[in-house]
Every structure is written in structure tokens, then in C-alpha cells.
Image: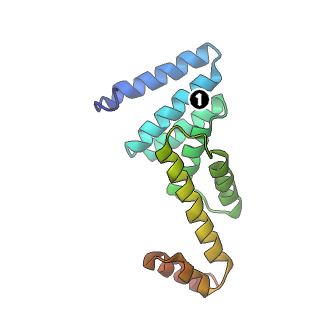
Amino acid sequence: FLALKHHDAAAEWRFQAAAKLAAANRRQKLAAHSLARLSYFVMLRGRHRDSLALAGAALSHASDPFAEYIQAVLRRSLGELRTEADLKIFEEKLSAAAGRLPSQALEEQRVASQAELQLWRNAASGGVGKCLMLYDAARILICLLCKASFR
């Protein structure tokens, strides 16, 4: 309710207070859930670094699929996936979150992210012809430039 009325500070305080109260009463999953929700709220407000830190804080309490998903998506959008191992972890987190996200819209975004990752994997694994399978002029150009640069 507070978030919908753009009372951001009050909404953030409420999520933080809920997490602290839950942790103080040894309800680690509830603390993680509250911080995951706060992380998502902060992400929607464009504060991606803060949101990433909050997702990490949520995961320090307990495993939470939503926090894992937010952390993975933010690491990708912030350019923190630099190695094959990072991409593999990202892929695993996307798969692990399947059917466990709080809304259908988030589930659709998760599926789209997985599909896009698979598209780029296919393009990276083959020759120049694989770039044409991307069907988007900007993506094809990026793919061709990368293939030319990293030969």
C-alpha cells in the first residue's frame, strides 16, 4: 500500500522492520522474504546496487528463490557476469527459480531471460551463420562484431 502511494521511505522502513523483527524471533525465512521484497521494491525504483546488497542480505538469513532471482538478474544487468562460471551460476539460479516467483509477470521475465541466454549460447558456439539466427539487427551486429574481435 505504501509503495503504491509512493511513500518510499515508509515502505522501506516497514520491510526493514519486518526483517529485523523476524530475525530477532529466529524466523530466518521470513526475514529473508521481507528483505527480498524490499530488494525488489528498491530495484523497481532504479537503485540497483542497493537492491543487490539487499538481496545478498536476504540470502544471509535463509535461502529464498525470489532473492536468488533478483541477485542473478541484477548481477547480469550490472555487468557482473564475466566468466563462463558466472554464466553457469546465473543459468542455474534462473532454472531453480522456475515456478517459485511471486508473480506471473516475473515468471515470464525469467523464461525470457533463459531464452535469451540460450540464444546467445547458440550464437557463441557456432560460426557467423549462427549470428543470423538472432533475428534482430542489433543483436546480429553485436554478434558479428564480437566474432570478428575475439578471433
Residue at 54% across, 15% down: 21
The location of residue 68, given as percent across then percent down, is: 61, 42
Q: In this view, which residue lies farthest toward the top?
A: 25
As displayed, is residue 116 above or below residue 98? below
Q: In this view, does 136 lie above or below 12?
A: below
Residue 76 appears at what percent x and percent y?
55, 56
* Quadrant of the image containing the N terminus: top left
* Residue 78 visible to the viewer: no
How packed is label 1: few (under 14 Cα within 10 Å), some, or many (20 or more)?
many
* Colour setup of the view: rainbow
Q: Mark 1 points at which residue?
A: 32
| Image label count | 1
Res 20 → quadrant:
top right
In this view, which residue lies farthest toward the left? 5
Q: In which quarter of the image is residue 99?
A: top right
Q: Is residue 27 left or right of residue 137?
A: right
Amino acid type, label 1: Ala
Measuring from the top left, give residue 12's x and y in whole percent: 41, 28
Q: Which of 33 and 151 is in front in this view?
A: 33
Is 106 placed above or below 114 here? above
Is 8 placed left or right of 49 in the picture? Answer: left
Residue at 62% x, 39% y is 65
Residue at the image point whose x is 30% and y is 28% from the top: 7
Estimate the x, y position of residue 133 in percent, counting from the top left. 56, 79
